[in-house]
Amino acid sequence: MAELRTELRARSLTGPTTARVLVELGFHLLCALGGIALFVIADALPWQALGLLIMTLGNLGVGTNTHTASHHAASSKRWVNDLLTWFGYPFFLGMSATSWRYQHVTLHHRSPNVAGVDGDSNLMPLFALTEPEVQARRGLHRIYLRRAQWLVLPMLAWATGFARQKKCTQRLISVLRDPEQRRWAHWTDAGALVAHVVAWFVVPSLFFPVLDVIGFNLLRVALVGYPLFAVLAPAHYPAGAVALEPGAKPTDAVRLQTATTINFRTGPLGRLWCSGLEYQIEHHLFPTCSHVHYRTMSPLVKAYCDRHGYQHRTLGWAAAIWQTLRVFRRPKPVVRHVDELRVTEMGQREAIVDPVVDLVDLADAPGDVVQA
């Protein structure tokens, strides 16, 4: 990894790209606000629908773009990263920035797909991603998870944004109540959330009916839920991205990231709105690098993985979403010894099977899903 870092640094792929990030953020903001304006002033339903679509893509872009800042990768100056994070998350999207950083940066990135640690992979009690989660339930709950959750998912994916808002807000309130945990950043975070309420609810209520304002903001969050799921879920939910049992402590940090993570391909517009999240392997290995570099970094990272027997898998975006949906139909098993998971010279993934917990069954995966 030190050699790879040196190579990336020599190619100027590790430094911040603040100007580019800000230009992209400006475009996303223009889409979000322009879409809202079109929705408000248009009389015809098709134009209103177009306005909502443009707004939703803009909201998605603001979230993915400022995600880079939440990893302190948008600028070399910490205050710039913090300012962008506070703008994108609590002020614009109504989601606590400090809670996001704790749940995503601290927990998820250090322990991706580790049950009991990575909250991003815990969708219970509504959905189960792994077979042990199903087995741990009884009665009607198990029957639902086994038979019906894959049917319910499309009807509830819109709640993705609300679920993240709720989870982050609950943690922020908990921290603010604890003098041992709270810091000035938490108060700033809370202040940005108050500013969000003022800017998105109070001020518009001076010009529009209150119920209309509330309804519009609920619709704004609900609409971004589907594209947010389509961007975030394919990286870790498919069966090819292994799930680890509770308490798993892999010693090979690189293998932990590559075994639990999958890339997906997008076109130019997809890359713009994903802000690097389609290159999840590169992001997990180098989270403090700007997303602008990931496309150029990816071939170098893949070559490194090939040389050292690590997995580096890329799916088409549609295939990645399909593999994600399949997991809700057939939850995946868990892995105990991810350190022993490797790629052989023949390009096939092998592992030493634990006598208690079997490894993910790759024989069930289509040939174009698992790529060495």
Image (cartoon, rainbow, N blue to C red):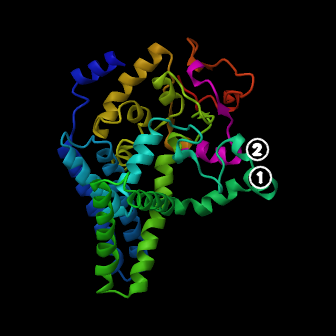
Q: Which residue is mark 2?
A: 135
Position of 201 compared to 359: left or right?
Answer: left
Asked which quadrant contains residue 198, the reply is bottom left
Residue drawn at x 34%, y 34% is 295
Contact flag, marks 2 and 1 (Cβ < 8 Å): yes
Closer to the camera, 59 or 106?
Answer: 106
**Residue 28 in view, yes or no:** no
Asked which quadrant contains residue 55, the reply is bottom left
Q: Residues within 10 Å of mark 1 (few under 14, many from 20)?
A: some
Q: Does the stretch in magenta take in 238? A: no
* Among numbered discs 2 and 1, the one appearing first in the sequence: 2
Closer to the camera, 56 or 143?
Answer: 143
Residue 22 x, y percent position in the rendering: 21, 50
Compared with 29, 103 (above or below) is: above
Q: Which residue is mark 1?
A: 142
**Residue 211 in view, yes or no:** yes
Amino acid type for the residue under numbered disc 1 = Arg
Quadrant of image for the N terminus: top left
Closer to the camera, 300 or 179?
Answer: 179
* Magenta region: 321-340
Compared with 184, 71 (above or below) is: above
Compared with 90, 301 (above or below) is: above
Amino acid type for the residue under numbered disc 2 = Gln
Residue 165 x, y percent position in the rendering: 45, 61
Report the Cα–Cα distance between label 2 and label 1.
Answer: 7 Å
